[in-house]
Image (cartoon, rainbow, N blue to C red):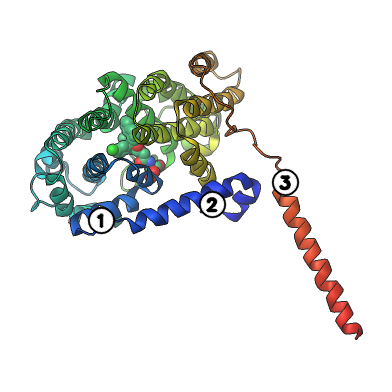
Amino acid sequence: MGSLGAILRHPSDFYPLMKLKMAASNAEKQIPPQPHWGFCYSMLHKVSRSFALVIQQLGTELRDAVCIFYLVLRALDTVEDDTSIPTDVKVPILKAFHQHVYDNEWHFSCGTKEYKVLMDQFHHVSTAFLELGKRYQEAIEEITKRMGAGMAKFICKEVETIDDYDEYCHYVAGLVGLGLSKLFHASGAEDLAPDSLSNSMGLFLQKTNIIRDYLEDINEIPKSRMFWPRQIWSNYVNKLEDLKYEENSEKAVQCLNDMVTNALTHVEDCLTYMSALRDPSIFRFCAIPQVMAIGTLALCYNNIEVFRGVVKMRRGLTAKIIDRTRTMADVYGAFYDFSCMLKSKVDKNDPNATKTLSRIEATQKSCRDAGLRNKRKSYILPSEPRYSFVPVLVLLIILAIFLAQFFASRSSNY
Ligand code: IN0
């Protein structure tokens, strides 16, 4: 749960946080009894926290398929990320991963902590995969094959140009969008979305992660991971790692703002994709990560802390987003709010200010034109007077001390 300090500063976080906590403990009670499904759902909760709750509210058949898809992708990611595996061992595993999912005797030990458990006991994931419907299996196989090949390509290649950046993000996240759209269609609940829109959904999420995780990736041991494209950072510094040094703070923030402006190009496609969804649980599943992403970009923009430590949305705001993202009106409202926050942070002297403002204004226009924003509470403006909870608490404490002293003095008088 959020820290006490954060709750006192944002008292309206309390109720959504409690709701999230209760949903999490209910979900834990619903872990299926069969060992392979039990393993998959407990693993899902370990590796994805709040996102697992959103997966869990999908219809049963689709939920199982998405759970397996998520774990297969996490396993593929674990192989890609493990710097201790020599390239000549790693590349063939990535390329053949789509075949390994059919073989419940296959496993490859790598990764750390819960990811090591996932890899060591991958047979549970394969067993569950083999119980999915044929159309789900085929969608997962096709995407795993394309993603593995794409990851293998980028093992030996750096992200130089913006096209490389879009291509890398396509392999690791855009393809997830294509795969999910196939799974939604296979479930019979949705029409098949155009590939370019599905791709943008993934790119918007992945670019946000890459921006937010700059410091973690650059400080990775034994070797830095670098996803920011040279075509962008070379306009500001000579080496990507120079962005983290204090003497380059001004350039670092300008570069960060350039990266955020690049990510904003996908917003329009994401709104179009989400507005075509019909099933309420699929809608929530897609919309919650997108709202979190625009919120994270608003938080990161012009924020030097990205180069100093972890910049993350407070837990209470995440809980509010999960609680309040139900309809397209909620999404337009949230995108509008976070665009206003972004706009208020743009400095006229930033080299990309005009470009950034025009993208923000395009987003605001889409949200206004839809005419759907409801009378919801804002995420960025305090929805209740800030002073409501804290002074009441202080007053209660003073009253308690006063009463305690009063009774103590009375008893000493007798
Ligand atoms: C995801 C995506 C995801 C969800 C819904 C629709 C999508 C459409 C296109 C592409 C991806 C889509 O969402 C998750 C969200 C997530 O895991 N959140 C984490 C928070 C965090 O900070 O890690 C959580 O713990 O709650 C996501 O980030 N990815 C993902 C992976 C697999 C699937 Cl099936 C869906 C990862 C990525 C790289 C962005 C695709």
Label whose residue precedes the other's in the sequence (2 or 3): 2
Few, some or many residues within 10 Å of mark 3 (<14, 14–19, 20+): few
The residue positioned 56% from the left and 20% from the top of the image is 350
Few, some or many residues within 10 Å of mark 1 (<14, 14–19, 20+): some
Numbered marks: total? 3
Q: Secondary structure at mark 3?
A: loop
Q: Which residue type does callout 1 highlight?
A: Pro
Q: CA distance from mark 2 to mark 3?
A: 19 Å
Q: Nearer the viewer, residue 254 or 368?
A: 368
Label whose residue precedes the other's in the sequence (2 or 1): 2
Instruction: Give the residue pinned by disc 1.
Output: 32
Q: Nearer the viewer, residue 93 or 284?
A: 284
Few, some or many residues within 10 Å of mark 2 (<14, 14–19, 20+): some
Give the numbered dot on residue 2: 2
Tell me where residue 147 sits by quadrant: top left
Q: Which residue type does callout 2 highlight?
A: Gly
The residue positioned 38% from the left and 23% from the top of the image is 270
Can residue 219 be seen by looking at this rendering?
A: no
Location of residue 378 in the rendering, given as x and y in whole percent from the top left corner: 59, 32
- Is label 3 or label 1 in front? 1
Q: CA distance from mark 3 to mark 1?
A: 44 Å
